[in-house]
Image (spheres, grey):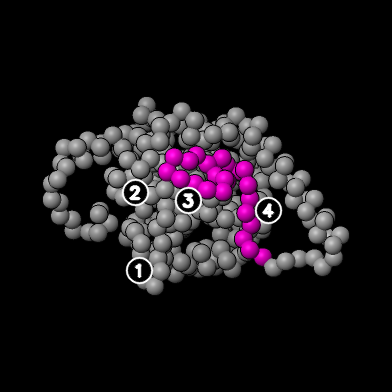
């Protein structure tokens, strides 16, 4: 939602540039009240825009190739092509509640694979709780409890896989109706959806490096919108996750290896035991 009105394969989102609240019933019955609300909205949007524009990371993609960010159609052919929908991936329940500098951003991820990613990006500026963190657990069959409802209600940012994978989490978000809360739906971001029991793509999005890079950039935008004063730190962490000089295997190294495999085995018939690898 902070990427502008449209997003295409080469677009780069500008975190925090706009806030599109979830639809609500119209309020106010008098012309004066409408004018007052309009003025307040203009002032609020102007303040948020000024904060983001004057920050040191006006472009979260600065210094990275489209391939590294998963926003290039060629890179997308690794395991499916998708133009990220940054404009609709994150919704906000009313005006966003910024987290003051020095306070920790509370993040809840429905699954630990997204929780791990956002915790690396947020570092000690975030406190991340992953609800489903047992590899033997099936998120489809997970039964939410009152503790889950409480942590989701208190979160500044909630991240769900979507695509019918964690519908229970979306139900808790709707029930809590927490003002100013951000909700990132990875399925919406990557254009993967489910309707009538038919999935438009692979719901196991964490196996696709293209989708992972889309998600990482959306997480960056969401964190900057919540705490603009920490933009420089988020940018540094974002760089570490993408840089080939980072400790361990970085995302651009995965791209390089995937390209190598594609070139070496192009045209080879491959059999898989699980559809998650297709």
Q: Is residue 273 left or right of residue 231?
A: left
Distance from label 3 to label 1 (Cα)? 20 Å
- Residue 81's disc is 2
Q: Which mark is residue 9?
A: none
* Figure quadrant of the C terminus: bottom left
Of circles 4 and 3, which is in front?
3
Q: Which of marks 2 and 4 precedes in the sequence? A: 2
Q: CA distance from mark 4 to mark 3?
A: 21 Å
Q: Position of residue 259 (x, y in %)?
A: 25, 37
Asked whether residue 181 is in view, the answer is no
Residue closest to the far bottom: 196
What is the chief secondary structure element of the magenta stretch?
A: loop
First in sequence: mark 1 or mark 4?
4
User: x and y percent of residue 101 in the render?
Assistant: 66, 38
Q: Nearer the viewer, residue 72 or 239?
A: 72
Q: Nearer the viewer, residue 215 or 53?
A: 53
The label on residue 95 is 4
Q: What kind of element bears circle 3?
A: loop
State the SS at label 1: strand
Work out whether residue 83 can be spotted: yes
Label 1 vs 2, first from the N-terminus: 2
Query: Does 201 sit above or below residue 12?
Result: below
Marks 2/3: CA–CA distance = 13 Å
Which residue does the numbered mark 1 point to in the structure image? 198
The image quadrant that residue 23 belongs to is bottom right
Q: Residues within 10 Å of mark 4 (few under 14, many from 20)?
A: some
């Amino acid at each position: 939602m902070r990427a502008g009105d449209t997003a295409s394969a080469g677009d780069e989102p500008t975190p925090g540039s706009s806030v599109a609240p979830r639809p609500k019933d119209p309020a106010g019955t008098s012309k004066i009240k409408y004018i007052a609300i309009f003025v307040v909205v203009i002032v609020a949007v102007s303040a948020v825009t000024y904060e983001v524009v004057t920050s040191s990371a006006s472009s979260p993609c600065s210094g990275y190739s489209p391939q590294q960010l998963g926003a290039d159609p060629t890179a997308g052919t690794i395991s499916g092509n998708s133009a990220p929908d940054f404009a609709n991936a994150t919704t906000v329940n009313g005006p966003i509640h910024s987290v003051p500098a020095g306070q920790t951003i509370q993040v809840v991820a429905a699954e630990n694979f997204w929780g791990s990613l956002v915790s690396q990006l947020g570092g000690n500026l975030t406190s991340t709780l992953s609800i489903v963190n047992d590899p033997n657990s099936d998120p489809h069959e997970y039964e939410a409890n009152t503790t889950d409802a409480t942590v989701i209600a208190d979160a500044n940012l909630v991240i769900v896989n979507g695509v019918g994978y964690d519908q229970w989490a979306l139900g808790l978000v709707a029930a809590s109706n927490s003002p100013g809360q951000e909700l990132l739906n990875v399925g919406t971001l990557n254009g993967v959806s489910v309707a009538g029991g038919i999935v438009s793509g692979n719901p196991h999005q964490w196996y696709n490096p293209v989708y992972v890079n889309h998600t990482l950039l959306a997480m960056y935008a969401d964190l900057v919108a919540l705490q603009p004063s920490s933009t420089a730190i988020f940018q540094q962490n974002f760089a570490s996750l993408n840089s080939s000089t980072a400790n361990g295997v970085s995302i651009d190294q995965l791209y390089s290896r995937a390209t190598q495999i594609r070139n070496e085995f192009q045209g080879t018939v491959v059999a898989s035991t699980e559809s998650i690898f297709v």
